[in-house]
Image (cartoon, rainbow, N blue to C red):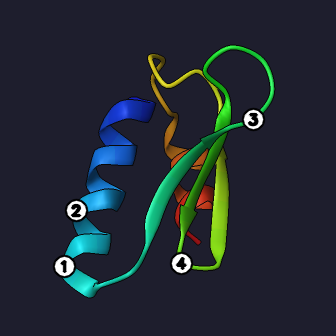
Amino acid sequence: MNGFEFEKRVKRLGRRSGTDVRFEPHGKGSHGRLYYGDRFTTLKDRRKEIGRGLLKAMCM
């Protein structure tokens, strides 16, 4: 799964649960923060694959 796919899935989850989801550019290039309600995770290059360990940490 890459960063764009992760963002799309989180946005779909947010629509279903009624939670505000937004991406705000932050830092260099395509880096930014993906907010899910009052929580956030940092997405690095959204075109690159996200490893299993990092994906698990981002979902916690």
Residue 26 is tagged as 3
Q: Are marks 4 and 1 in contact (CB under 8 Å)?
A: no
Upstream in sequence: badge 3 or badge 2 = 2
CA–CA distance in space, label 4 to label 1:
13 Å
Secondary element type, mark 1: helix
14 left or right, relative to 24: left
Where is mark 1, residue-wise? 16
Q: Residue furthest right?
A: 27
CA–CA distance in space, label 1 to label 2:
6 Å
Kindly identify the amino acid type of the residue bearing the numbered disc 2. Answer: Arg
Q: Is 14 situated above or below 4?
A: below
Kindly identify the amino acid type of the residue bearing the numbered disc 3. Answer: His
Secondary element type, mark 4: loop
13 left or right, relative to 26: left
Where is mark 2, residue-wise? 12
Instruction: Count numbered badges in the picture.
Output: 4
Where is mark 4, residue-wise? 37
CA–CA distance in space, label 3 to label 2:
22 Å
Residue that appears at 78% across and 18% down: 28
Q: Quadrant of the N terminus?
A: top left
Upstream in sequence: badge 4 or badge 1 = 1
Rendering quarter of residue 4 = top left
Rendering quarter of residue 40 = bottom right
